[in-house]
Every structure is written in C-alpha cells, then in structure tokens.
Image (cartoon, rainbow, N blue to C red):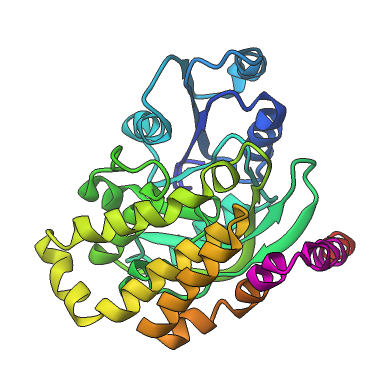
Amino acid sequence: MADLPLVSIITPSYNQARFLEATLRSVLEQDYPNIEYLVVDGASTDGSLEIICSYADRLTWWVSEKDSGQSEAVNKGLRRARGEIVGWLNSDDIYLPGAVSAAVAVFGSSPDAAVVYGDALAIDADGKPFNLMCARQYSLVDLMAFNIICQPAAFMRRSVLERVGYLNPAYHLLMDNLLWMNLARLAPLVYVPQTWAAARYHDQAKNRTRGAAYGQEARMLIDDLKSHPEFTGIITSNEKRIMAGVNRFDAFYLTDAGHPGRALRAYWRAFRLHPPTALGDWKHILLAKLTLLGLQKVRNLYDRLHSRHLNSEG
C-alpha cells in the first residue's frame, strides 16, 4: 500500500438516511486498498447519525455538526484530506465497483491531469438505472457553456485543487461547475469513457426541488467570472456560445422541474445565440414540447423502456 497513492473520499450528509448506507458501502467496498474516508454530517435528525456510527470504525474521520450547506461540508473534508487524489460523493449517490481503482490508473497515465472523470448512471430512489449520462472531453469553453461533468464520476488531484481554494460557498447548486472551470485553467481535465458512479434522482434531490433556480445561478456565475481577468477574455471571445449554454442549461432544468413553456422559451434564446448549442439538446426540446402538449405519458413510456434496457444490461 505504501506504493499506492492515497485516495481521500468525502461524503457530505444531511438528512439522507434512506440512501446514506448505500453511499457508505459503495466507498467502503471499493477494491482499491488505500482509501481514507471522511464523512461530514450537518447535524442530521433523521437517523443518519446512527448509520454513520455503525460504520465509524471503518471511517478515517467523521463529524456531525451544523453547517451552512453542502459547500461548507465538503470544504471541511477537503481541508482534512491527506490523499494525493480526492473525490466527494454525496449521501444519495454511489460509486460503482472498481471506480476508484480505475481513476487512480488514469491519473497514473496522465501525470499532468487536474481532474479525471467518467460517465454516470442516473438511478431512481430505489436504485434502478433509467439513463446513462455520457460526458466527453471538455475544454474550458465547453465547461463555461455548461457542458456538465457528473460530479460523483470525477476525481481531483489535491495539489491542483489546493491552488484554486476549494468550493465557493456563495454557490449552492453550481459550486462543482465553478470548481471544474477553475481547475481547467491550471491543468488538463481528462475524460475516460467508463461508467464510474450513479447519481440518484428522487423527489428531495436539488435538481427536482430547485430546478428552476439552476439557470439563475448559472447567469450569476458567468456575471461573476466577467470580473475575473483570467476569464474575461474567454467570455468576450465566446460570449454567444457561453450564453447559449446558460440558456440551454436553464431550459434543461426547467423541463425537469415541470416548466415546459419557460423551458422552450429558454431553448429559443439559446438557438438565437448559437444554434448548435441548442440543437445538441434536441431530445430535451422534444420532451418539453410533449410535456407542454400534455403528452407526458410518452416520456414515461420511454423512461420505462430505457430503464428496462439498462437493468437488463446490468
């Protein structure tokens, strides 16, 4: 083990007892032997503390105390992390078997990489997959146009992470997106076409309960970056594409939050700014149109058939 890089995994937790044990086990049952695991609970009151205590002897460190939200919780763990490689896994997401070993291998073959990231399954509250979220190799401009890295499928090099100062607590939804942008300024981000994690979608998840707020925070983020010299020139040179990405991103979450009319207007704004950006999301545009026409049953049927296919493959 002395020859293997130490990997630090942080799980921020707050009132997710229904899913927490699956998250903990997905880390503790990884086949990579040199992991330290840190759990930062925000003073949960739903039985999470009892679950954490039942695994305490297998955790490197844990705490349960009030905090200001996910960013503060993750940052607490990051400040204690000793690993050369770092990841964080929210308390409703899971790693797939072999994910950590695979990420370490990619870092070994990509010594300059700040981040390595893969694909992720979307799973429902019962753990059944219903979609495969495929990424690709993203540039900094791609990230600023809100092409999304699925956060649980990403791992970071701690030496680069410390140079950008962790998560910005001013952001409650897009703190990971901002972090990828800051890291991409300093070193390469490397995509691997492997499925490393599963992100859980359920009624209490932020993408469902606060879907309409994602676009607002995306606009705030880009406005903020305009005042940072290291980003100003990039935004000026790519403003139409970046703002099209903001509108497409807004539309995507508005659709999932049940606002198809607003979503289609946002897609139209994206199309006027940069047609390829909008049209790249044509499936979601179609979903918004079907939902607006009251044909949500068509989407429900598609989801059931797709879920059945993914489960049969698994």
Name which residue lies at 68% across and 42% down.
Answer: 202
Foreground pick, 177 / 273:
273
Foreground pick, 118 / 100:
118
Q: Is residue 297 magenta?
A: yes
Foreground pick, 286 / 16:
286
Q: Position of residue 216 (x, y in %)?
A: 37, 53
Please state the total of marks drawn on the protein image: 0
User: Relative to 263, is 99 on the left or the right?
Assistant: right
Q: Position of residue 115 (x, y in %)?
A: 40, 60
User: Relative to 174, is 11 on the left or the right?
Assistant: right
Q: Position of residue 177 (x, y in %)?
A: 38, 56
User: Relative to 20, is 83 on the left or the right?
Assistant: left
Foreground pick, 216 / 11:
216
Q: As displayed, is residue 171 above or below residue 180?
A: above
Q: Main secondary structure of the magenta part?
A: helix
Name which residue lies at 25% across and 80% down.
Answer: 238
Q: As displayed, is residue 93 above or below residue 295?
A: above
Q: Quadrant of residue 31?
A: top right
Q: Is residue 159 magenta?
A: no
Q: As displayed, is residue 74 above or below residue 158?
A: above
Q: Is residue 106 visible?
A: no
Q: Is residue 194 visible?
A: yes
Residue at the extreme bottom of the image, as rendered: 275
User: Relative to 149, is 166 on the left or the right?
Assistant: left
Name which residue lies at 41% across and 57% down.
Answer: 215
Q: Quadrant of residue 233?
A: bottom left
Please provide the residue range marked out in magenta: 287-306
Quadrant in which the C terminus appears: bottom right
